[in-house]
Image (tube, helix red, strand yellow):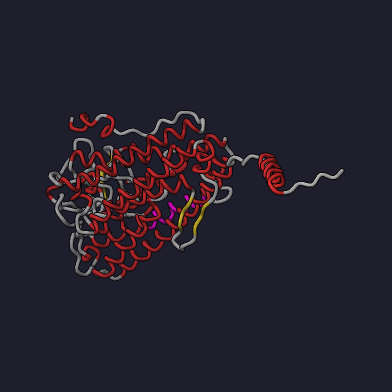
Amino acid sequence: MTVRYGGKLAAVAATLALTTAIFALPAKAETDPKAVLKTYSDIALAKYEDSLTTAKTLDTAVEALIAKPSQETLNAARDAWKAARVPYQQTEVYRFGNPIVDAWEGRVNSWPLDEGLIDYVAASYGTQSDTNALYTANVIANKSIEINGKKVDASKLSPEFLSSTLQEAGGIEANVATGYHAVEFLLWGQDLNGTGPGAGNRPFTDYDIKNCTGGNCDRRAEYLKSASGLIVSDLEEMVGNWKEGGAARKTLVEGDPKAGVSAILTGMGSLSYGEMAGQRMKLGLLLHDPEEEHDCFSDNTHNSHLYDAIGIRDAYRAQYKRLDGSTVSGPSVSDMVKAADPALDKELAGKLDTSVAKMEAIKARAEAGEAYDQQIGEGNTEGNATVQAAIDALVDQTKSIERVVATLKLDAIAFEGSASLDSPDKVFK
């Protein structure tokens, strides 16, 4: 006898069949950590390539300034410097977890610097330091200087001399001779406005050999060109490290996947907490000291902080919008966390967005006329609160990053700390 189903019985049978089919489907595959590391490496390559492109534009603008000094060519070089900071700051999240980047980074973004090593400074800068014998060495004005008791020939301010002899001369970290901030000082000069309005105001005639101000215009131009060229060559090296077969990429994609994911989170957590929230922001806010601002000559700190925060967020969600408008993306740490704990993924994603929004609030105040060094000034209640809100957001997201480490069952990570956060009373001693 043939049994025919119809009406409600047919509907029930169809539902049972569909339910059986659903449960027969294979479980959603977990995100492959190696795929996450490949995306992370691809984005690193794209960011360093964009940094190299803008560094070359800066180098060309420096050449134009030297060839024909004018307010126009000086402004163009300054604009190129600011543009170069946008992609570079987004690479800083690759620090801390990647030893190759850490060993290299000091050449391109060391700060703060004792600028008297490089060029003339105002009387308010002082003439000596208890910790740095080269505090006012002024290598641009002096063709011979003394390092560790030995006379050194400084007649040629070549890239090799700056990088091999002058950079961290005497073992002093504040003797920053190369990188973005050395070039920044040479383009803007000292910011002598304290927490008042205004950035550095170096005249273009500091590069005009025929109508020279500041003295030694030829040597200043030589120094600037060498320092600018070094940024290009250093970035070329780092681009090579992230290409297929490059040392930084190979270390990650051919190593232990769990160690690689830990490297990503180490960069995110250490940059969030010790470096950004602590060293770059809380210290300056506690002291109300413009000398503790990251881009202290150009008053560009609001942008540098913002793009650091964006870089941290990009590392988590594995997305980067390139200068040409294209996007590099793929499997992410976010995907891994979402599979393990969707609520935690949502929590951290939201906190990363909050940090970016707080940095955008700092930028909005800066673009409205209140620079970052003014925002951290003593007595500026609203400005201080705006900066503190960004610090709080960075600290808060770090707590969630710590939870991610535990959720993914990774070995505990010791994120970089900061006395200004961990022991603020010691800052004043």
Q: Residue at x 52, y 52 (%)?
A: 329
Residue 119 shows in the view: yes
- Picture quarter with the N terminus: top right
Instruction: Give whichever of 396, 180 is nearer the camera.
Output: 396
**Residue 199 in the image: x percent, y percent?**
20, 56
Q: Residue at x 28, y 47 (%)?
A: 294
Instruction: Give whichever of 214, 200 is nearer the camera.
Output: 200
Q: Is residue 67 above or below residue 175?
A: below
Q: Residue at x 23, y 44 (%)?
A: 292
Q: Is residue 205 above or below residue 425?
A: below
Total tally of numbered discs in the picture: 0
**Residue 324 in the image: x percent, y percent?**
46, 63
What's the magenta bit mostly, secondary-structure-wise? helix
Instruction: Give whichever of 380, 348 is nearer the camera.
Output: 348
- The answer to whether residue 3 is left or right of residue 412 is right
Residue 102 shows in the view: no
Q: Give the magenta part as a residue range.
A: 229-240
Instruction: Give whichever of 352, 366 is nearer the camera.
Output: 352
Quadrant position of residue 203? bottom left
- Picture quarter with the C terminus: top left
- The answer to whether residue 215 is left or right of residue 223 is left
**Residue 362 in the image: x percent, y percent?**
26, 51
**Residue 90 in the image: x percent, y percent?**
40, 50
Magenta highlight on residue 86: no
Magenta highlight on residue 237: yes
